[in-house]
Amino acid sequence: MAGLKVSVAIVQELAVFSTVKKFISLEGISHCPQDEAPDLVNSILLDWIGE
């Protein structure tokens, strides 16, 4: 699957499922957000844990 690009529009379509509570697009971040933007991901996770 090297080089596979999935558009945000396609992924957003999955947000219609009842199990998806919130879709958060991380601009410029690819398949490993916890490594690429740990502060951003940690902030999102802490908000989610606090809900």
Image (cartoon, grey):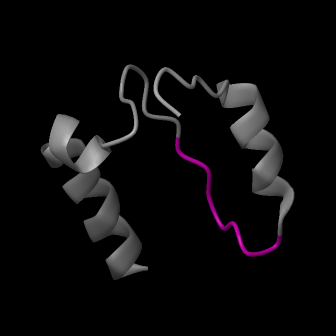
Say if 13 sits above or below 16 in the image: above
Which is more toward the observer, 26 or 36? 36
Which is more toward the observer, 32 or 49? 32
Determine whether, in the image, residue 35 is placed left or right of residue 51: left
The secondary structure that dominates the magenta segment is loop
Residue drawn at the location 34% of the way across and 79% of the way down: 49
Q: Is residue 41 visible?
A: yes
Say if 47 sits above or below 25 in the image: below
Query: Residue 48: which quarter of the image?
Result: bottom left
Does the magenta-highlighted stretch encompass residue 21? yes
Residue drawn at the location 65% of the way across and 28% of the way down: 8
- Provide the residue span drawn in magenta: 18-24
Place of residue 50 in the rendered image (x, y in percent of width and height, measured from the top left): 34, 79
Does the magenta-highlighted stretch encompass residue 32? no
Q: Is residue 37 visible?
A: no
Place of residue 1 in the rendered image (x, y in percent of width and height, measured from the top left): 53, 34
Which is more toward the observer, 46 or 11? 11
Place of residue 47 in the rendered image (x, y in percent of width and height, measured from the top left): 34, 66
Determine whether, in the image, residue 29 is placed left or right of residue 20: left
Q: Residue furthest front?
A: 1
Determine whether, in the image, residue 5 is placed left or right of residue 2: right
Quarter of the picture holding the C terminus: bottom left
Residue drawn at the location 49% of the way across and 20% of the way down: 3
Say if 51 sits above or below 34 in the image: below
Determine whether, in the image, residue 45 is placed left or right of residue 15: left
Say if 14 sits above or below 27 in the image: below
Place of residue 38 in the rendered image (x, y in percent of width and height, measured from the top left): 15, 46
Residue drawn at the location 24% of the way across and 55% of the way down: 43
How many labels, in total? 0
